[in-house]
Image (cartoon, grey):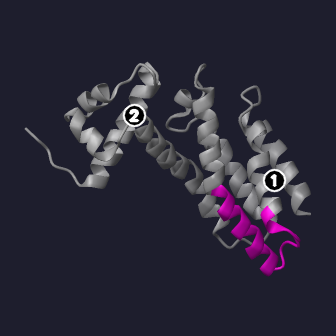
Amino acid sequence: MRISKEPEVRKREIADTAMRLFAEKGYEATSIKDIAKAVNVVPGLCYNYFKSKYELFEYAITLYASECTAPLVAVLERDEESVEAYLEKIFDIFIKNDGKEKYHDFYHKDGNQLFHKQLEIVMNDKFHPYMKKFIIRLNERGLLHVEDPDTVSKFIVYGQAPIINDDSLMPEEKAEKVMSMIKLLLE
């Protein structure tokens, strides 16, 4: 029996299933036919939404990046009393989520370093505008005095990646190192 779903719901279902299979079998070993079978649809339906497996993967990365950055964006969009209050909330979110993300194992699996780099780029590109607006807003509120919000926000967002992705560090160590650098930049 065929089950009809809204296009965005179906598209998301296909992407979630693809990521699950990529994590289980690997990207190269997973075909559109495998994904369609797991979703219980014909491969042609997958191709209605995505021209290729790579396009499907790019869509999934974008969704995942949005999910991973959403809690941090929510903190940046709040009105807190001090810079320290923001940093504490970001610290707490990072500690709570680091290594527990939905597709963490796929992106951190040996052989998937290029996929992880792609995710890092997408996440940073998504997050940067929010960090820039945050710094500008805190400047306007008198909580910061950053002369070049664009450069500082880029340095914060793109510069923290090697520390965040260092699996030899515990989440608390990563967060402490990143937070100490952010504090230095924002002083």
Residue furthest out toward the left? 1
- Horizontal and vertical percent position of residue 55: 43, 41
Q: Please provide the residue range marked out in magenta.
A: 127-150
Residue picked out by circle 2: 53
Residue picked out by circle 1: 155
Task: Name the dominant secondary structure of the magenta segment.
Answer: helix
- Horizontal and vertical percent position of residue 89: 69, 57
Q: Residue 144: within the magenta?
A: yes
From the viewer's perspective, tell me whether residue 135 is left or right of residue 52: right
Q: Which mark is residue 163?
A: none
User: Relative to 86, does residue 40 appear above or below in the rendering?
Assistant: above
Instruction: Give SS at disc 2.
Output: helix
User: Relative to 38, does residue 185 appear above or below in the rendering?
Assistant: below
From the viewer's perspective, tell me whether residue 140 is left or right of residue 55: right
- Horizontal and vertical percent position of residue 36: 26, 32
- Local crowd at mark 1 within 10 Å, few (<14), some, or many (≥20)? some
From the viewer's perspective, tell me whether residue 14 is left or right of residue 139: left
The nearer-to-camera label among 2 and 1 is 2
Q: Amino acid at mark 1?
A: Phe
Q: Nearer the viewer, residue 64 or 89?
A: 64
Q: For the residues marked 2 and 1, what is the alpha-carbon distance in whole angstroms? A: 33 Å
Query: Which quadrant of the figure contains the N terminus?
Result: top left
Query: At 35% across and 35% down in the image, what residue appears?
Result: 17
